[in-house]
Amino acid sequence: MLRKGEAPGHQTPPHLHKDDGDDDDDAPSGFVKLISAEGFEFVVDKKAAMVSNTLRNMLTSPGGFSETREGEVRFPEISTPILEKICQYFYWSLHYSSGKETSEFQIEPEITLELMMAANYLDT
Amino acid sequence: MSGGGPPKKRNFKIELFKHRVELDPKYAERTWKVLEHAIHEIYNHNASGLSFEELYRSAYNMVLHKYGEKLYDGLERTMTWRLKEISKSIEAAQGGLFLEELNAKWMDHNKALQMIRDILMYMDRTYVPQSRRTPVHELGLNLWRDHIIHSPMIHSRLLDTLLDLIHRERMGEMINRGLMRSITKMLMDLGAAVYQDDFEKPFLDVTASFYSGESQEFIECCDCGNYLKKSERRLNEEMERVSHYLDAGTEAKITSVVEKEMIANHMHRLVHMENSGLVNMLVDDKYDDLARMYNLFRRVFDGLSTIRDVMTSYLRETGKQLVTDPERLKDPVEFVQRLLNEKDKHDKIINVAFGNDKTFQNALNSSFEYFINLNNRSPEFISLYVDDKLRKGLKGATEEDVEVILDKVMMLFRYLQEKDVFEKYYKQHLAKRLLSGKTVSDDAERSMIVKLKTECGYQFTSKLEGMFTDMKTSQDTMIDFYAKKSEELGDGPTLDVHILTTGSWPTQPCPPCNLPTEILAICDKFRTYYLGTHSGRRLTWQTNMGTADIKATFGKGQKHELNVSTYQMCVLMLFNSTDGLTYKDIEQDTAIPASDLKRCLQSLACVKGKNVLRKEPMSKDISEDDTFYFNDKFTSKLVKVKIGTVVAQKESEPEKQETRQRVEEDRKPQIEAAIVRIMKSRRVLDHNSIVAEVTKQLQARFMPNPVVIKKRIESLIEREFLERDKADRKLYRYLA
């Protein structure tokens, strides 16, 4: 987590950058950049990203795939709102599994299906 | 996504995720090509240009669009093709590079396999379980096993290379252990069965034949100690080998092979090896070799019992020689000291070399018990040993030393079966010590009695304690006697009387000798005094047990104080009135029993430096025709001359018989008491059971002889304590 005392279930956690102008390749090793179909970039903790098994494999695979090298992952089939929700979920899940009291994770009905598809894809 | 989402609304229609995939018939083929290319690139170490996400998405979509089978089969085909290529390059590797190449390729394959598994994860997760196919990683290992390890060109070459390297290492060469470790680990990764079938089994076979040969060679040219050293080293080497580059599960197997070939197969030959076997090690106190033997033999079945059996029979044999060697029996103190030394020696061996193994201690104890009881004089000798120690041996020793020695004696005592015989002798010896005031330390005496008491109970020592009480009472009585009667006594000789309770002391009724008149007077005074203070008692003089200090003046006027026994005093006093007496005269005048008289004359006339009497003719032994003269020419550097009686320290044959007879007599009432005790509670019992029970009750003191038990039963029947059952003659009934 970037900041202490932060409820991960908040609608717009301040540490999620919606900033497509940031082309810094050198993301710190503790972070990873997730890029939506529309090109929005989300910088999240590696630890959080690894809630997804797909991402975990991607980031730890020994061979040096481009993602591992560059620290960024493009999802041409996941739209920005869904990816944002996913990132929120990563943090929520970390918090939840740490055993702390956690409020329910809110999912708006209209994105449920798409979110489920993405979850399947990300093995989350 | 899991977790606390709200319940989903049911009116949602599940539809396919919006992959904009036209159902292009070429779609699957095209996507597979991408993936196939990627797999090749991965094997070519060229993965950095690939996008994981893209590949993952491709595989994901293929599975999603029911092309899972195509994907899986394609993977299998591609991997097989790659592995065949790899196999060729491994086969081509020359000599020593073979293993290197194999290992390098294995590393490559492993890494590639992991990457492939990662990008095909979705297939692994969904398609594989659904269609019951082998997961990707396992598939990769299986293919490696089938196309590399089991390839005819590699399979036997691999095994030979490994076995050859291990053999070279056994012969002292350095080999690349890291490489070995990787290869064996590879075999393990391919499955325990691969490791066992393709390596471990042949390895164990080769090891067995190697050590079978080597042990044969060693045993022909090495002594036992060296052989064991070599075996130990080999065993350690093999264990080290396992820890360095074999699977841990092999350790038990390989050590058991080495143990069998090096030890179990040669165990008996080793133990009995001439000039260097177990017995020699024991004799020479080779603690290191013995410890090595113990540690090696304990690994194999029957190993320790082999050592134990040989040790036991050795102990019994040497012990038997020790206790039956007539030379050794001459000096009881030396005899017991030897026993103790043997015990110490073997205790130390068991302690140092055999890790204080209980079974060995038991073997040692049973061996000692066996041979100590082979000699029926052991009880006497042990008592004599204590006697010696308590007389002089312990002078100046600290309390701890005394305790140590006494504890050791008690240990021997525990081995004795005839504890009552020991008691008998101990009582005699204690009596002598007390009466002659020769005890070094009262504390040591008491400590010994306490030990006997804890070992055998109150009954065993009550009389011994009674003796101590008598000594104390006598002292008080004498002080009182002199306090009251000193004016009556004048300048006459001083008397010191020990009043001994009959029964507590091993006194035998013996006719009192004729005391010199000087002594008789004071003796009578004491008798009057004593009977005056204690009514209803009877006093008998035990002249055979007393001592006297007398002053004598010799030819040139030199004066000596002689410390002699009462008998000797009686004899010497005769020479106050005459210079020469025949044996017969002396015997008549003193009325000393013949055997005692001879002994006392011998010590007066035949011991150089203490010969206050002169004997005609000069000879070592006393005969009834000898004549004795006062020896005018006696000289001594000492003013006080102690003339000991020539006591055969140990008993002579007839005395021994006598003691034994007394012991047998004493046993009778004990056996009878035991029979009555048993019958009182059982009422009816058959003969064999009685014998068994009596033996059980009494064995703490002695081993009753069944024949004697039978006699006692008969005697009890005669006296109407028991009767035979009317119907069954074997049954006895108790008559209240």
Image (tube, coloured by chain):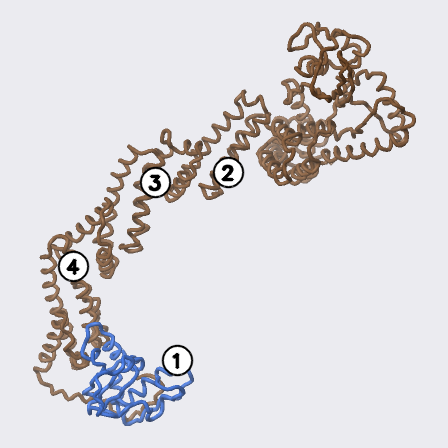
Mark 3 or 4: the one toward you: 3
Q: Are marks 2 and 1 in contact (CB under 8 Å)?
A: no
Amino acid type, mark 4: Leu
Q: Which element type, helix, strand or loop, lies under badge 1? A: loop
> The residue under label 3 is which amino acid type?
Lys
Q: Which residue is mark 1?
A: A98
Q: Which residue is mark 4?
A: B102
In this rendering, the label closer to the viewer, 1 or 3: 3
Q: Which mark is residue B229?
A: 3
Query: Badges 1 and 3: C-beta atoms under 8 Å apart?
Result: no
**Which corner quadrant of the image does residue B519 belong to?**
top right
What whole-number distance in Å separates the C-alpha atoms at marks 2 and 1?
63 Å
| Visual hue assigned to chain B | brown
Q: Nearer the viewer, residue B41 or B415?
A: B41
Residue at mark 4: chain: B
Is B82 placed above or below A79 here? above
Q: Mark 2 vs mark 1: same chain? A: no
Task: For marks 3 and 4, give the CA distance.
Answer: 38 Å
| Secondary structure found at label 2 | helix
In this rendering, the label closer to the viewer, 2 or 1: 2
* Image disc number at residue B446: none
Q: Which residue is mark 2?
A: B347
Mark 3 vs mark 4: which is more N-terminal?
4
Q: In the rendered view, does A41 fall on the left or right side of B274?
A: left
Name the quadrant of the N terminus of chain B. bottom left
Count of numbered circles in the view: 4
Q: Give the image location of residue B4, x and y in percent.
A: 36, 86
Q: Determine the chain carrying the residue at label 2.
A: B
